[in-house]
Image (cartoon, helix red, strand yellow):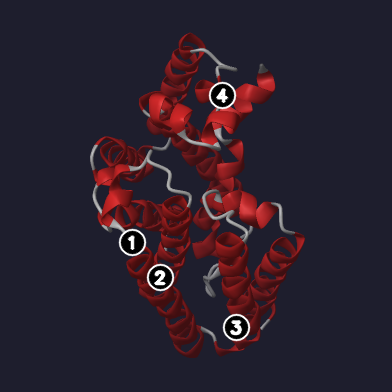
Amino acid sequence: MIKNIFKLIRYKDWVKNIIIFFPFIFNESNQNFFILYDLFFIFLSFSIICSLIYIFNDLIDIESDKRHSYKKKIKPLANGSISKRIAFALLFFLLILVIIIVFYFKLFFIHFFAYAILLVFYNLIFKKIIILDVFIISLGYLIRLDLGSNAIDVNTSINLLACIYFLVSFILFIKRYVEFSNQEKTRSSLRFYNVNFLNFLIITSGLAFAISCVYFIIFQKIYLIITLPFLIFNLYKYYKISIYNNLGEFPIDVVLKNRILLINTFIILFLIIIVYFVF
């Protein structure tokens, strides 16, 4: 039961919220490590809000997930390992936690509220609309980034926003490509996509990410040039694994289950930390 509850709240997806720490890592003027304590609790709070939305989404999509070739095996509601009654009880419990969180972190109410509303409308409306489905999800990552910036009282870097946006778009368009290739009929926006169009979107967003990184490196921190080969390799490796091994539907699993990708990602983070806290 406990294992299935963890699956339901999608604890592995909390990794996405590490973006909240990026403004601290990429900020040259702020090296106050005590603020990491506050950032950790904001990270945890935002993750709880995300889990609330994940459960809400799974309750809405339970029938379509049952028709999905893979989701019906791994999602607790779709495979019946957790009942709707338990899911609603957990939803209510997390809602109480979210209310407490919002009361405690009043300054960040707008971020919590904006993300929750964005994802609720995504699940109800926007995920059915071509391109907009990816745009809305990518916007959610920019909210994470801005939340981290506000937490340490710095301005969100436009260059960093661009890098995050295009990287997320690249990953999501690969996800759509794999879903389309698998001929899954559970996502209504897929009927408006085709292979050539998705390839164009993947290549365009990938190039935009690479260009944004180069621009960021040149105008923000030239020493970050040492990370560029690793970034390009990760981009290529992720694309290859996702497309040719048909694994792109679940981006977190692609990274966590591939040793090379995971190690390379840690190398990139290590090099960034070294550059910002040493040079």
Q: Read off the residue under disc 2.
A: 199
Q: Are marks 3 and 1 in contact (CB under 8 Å)?
A: no
Residue at coordinates 52% horizontally, 37% vertically from top-left?
69
Check disc 1 and give the amino acid type: Asn
Q: SS of the residue at dot 4?
A: helix
Image coordinates for residue 198, horizontal then vertical, percent: 37, 65
Q: What is the spatial separation of the Cα atoms under label 2 and label 3, in whole angstroms? A: 23 Å
Check disc 4 and give the amino acid type: Pro
Q: Quadrant of the N terminus?
A: top right
- Between 217 and 132, the one nearer to me in the picture: 132
Horizontal placement of 257 versus 126: left or right? right
Check disc 3 and give the amino acid type: Leu
* First of labels 2, 3 by sequence position: 2
Residue 76, disc: 4
Check disc 2 and give the amino acid type: Asn
Quadrant of residue 32 within the rendered picture: bottom right
Q: What is the spatial separation of the Cα atoms under label 3 and label 1, in whole angstroms? A: 31 Å
Q: Are marks 4 and 3 in contact (CB under 8 Å)?
A: no
Q: What is the spatial separation of the Cα atoms under label 4 and label 1, in whole angstroms? A: 31 Å
Residue 228, disc: 3
Residue at coordinates 34% horizontally, 38% vertically from top-left?
116
Q: Nearer the viewer, mark 4 or mark 2?
A: 2
Residue 13, disc: none
Q: Quadrant of the C terminus?
A: bottom right
* First of labels 4, 2 by sequence position: 4
* 50 to 129, vertically: above or below: above
Q: What is the spatial separation of the Cα atoms under label 4 and label 2, in whole angstroms? A: 32 Å
Q: SS of the residue at dot 1?
A: loop
Q: Nearer the viewer, mark 2 or mark 1?
A: 1
Residue 194, disc: 1
